[in-house]
Image (cartoon, rainbow, N blue to C red):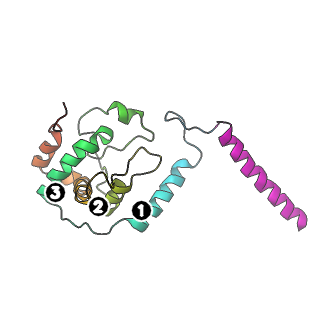
Amino acid sequence: MGKFVLGFITALILLVGGAFLYLRLGFAPVATASTLLPFERQISRAALHARVSKEAPQLAPIQPSERAYIFGAEVYRSNCAVCHGMPGQEQTAIARGEFPKPPKLLEGQGVTDDPVGVTYWKVANGIRLTGMPGFKGLLSDEQMWQVSLLLANADKLSPTIKTALQNPVPGKP
């Protein structure tokens, strides 16, 4: 039994030591153009899902409405479009350079299948190691809910809201 325990401890030390050397000697793929680490996507998704499931609000304090969507569209154009894009427009250089690639939130399914509280949590807190910043302290709670409602209902937006999304951001070309 003692040889088994000694072998197990030795294997564990070699495994941890090998991982440390792999990282310390610069073999880990950390550039945005690098390949994924083994199981990186699965581990990060599992961790994000567990945390969001635990902390995301269940109900929005404001109701979906044209007014909320208009204000959400303004927030989106000013803060989100540079990475997540606008319908029918090319990706920006910033979005092309990010890793992982930011999802297009207003094309296809986006996050319309996520509960609005999950989207709010991601807007407020950001997502580590993805380039997604947290907007808590930068946007008001109401603004974060407005953009979250807009995105949760992106597949049901009226022509008025779609037009508002296409308007240029004030003060920007």
Q: Give residue 166's position: percent from left, percent from top.
A: 16, 39
User: Looking at the picture, which amino acid does disc 1 mark?
Assistant: Val
**Disc number at residue 156?**
none
Whether the residues at callouts 1 and 2 have beta carbons within 8 Å, the answer is no
Visible residue check, residue 157: no
Whether the residues at callouts 2 and 3 have beta carbons within 8 Å, the answer is no
User: Looking at the picture, which amino acid does disc 3 mark?
Assistant: Ala
Placement of the C terminus among the 4 image quadrants = top left
**Disc number at residue 68?**
3
Q: Is residue 3 magenta?
A: yes
Q: Taking 60 as reference, is 160 above or below it?
A: above
Q: How many neighbours does mark 2 have within 10 angstroms: few (below 14), some (14-19), or many (20 or more)? A: many
Decide if residue 80 is on the left or right side of residue 53: left
Q: How many neighbours does mark 3 have within 10 angstroms: few (below 14), some (14-19), or many (20 or more)? A: some
User: Looking at the picture, which amino acid does disc 2 mark?
Assistant: Val
Q: Give residue 23's position: percent from left, percent from top.
A: 65, 42
Visible residue check, residue 71: yes
Pointer 1 residue: 52
Q: Quadrant of residue 24?
A: top right
Q: Give residue 47's position: percent from left, percent from top.
A: 50, 58
The magenta stretch is 1-27
Q: Is residue 167 magenta?
A: no
* Residue sitting at x 12%, y 51%: 158
Residue placed furthest toward the front: 137
Q: How far is the residue under mark 1 from the one under mark 2? A: 12 Å
* Residue sitting at x 43%, y 68%: 54
Q: How far is the residue under mark 1 from the one under mark 3? A: 24 Å
Pointer 2 residue: 116
Placement of the N terminus among the 4 image quadrants = bottom right
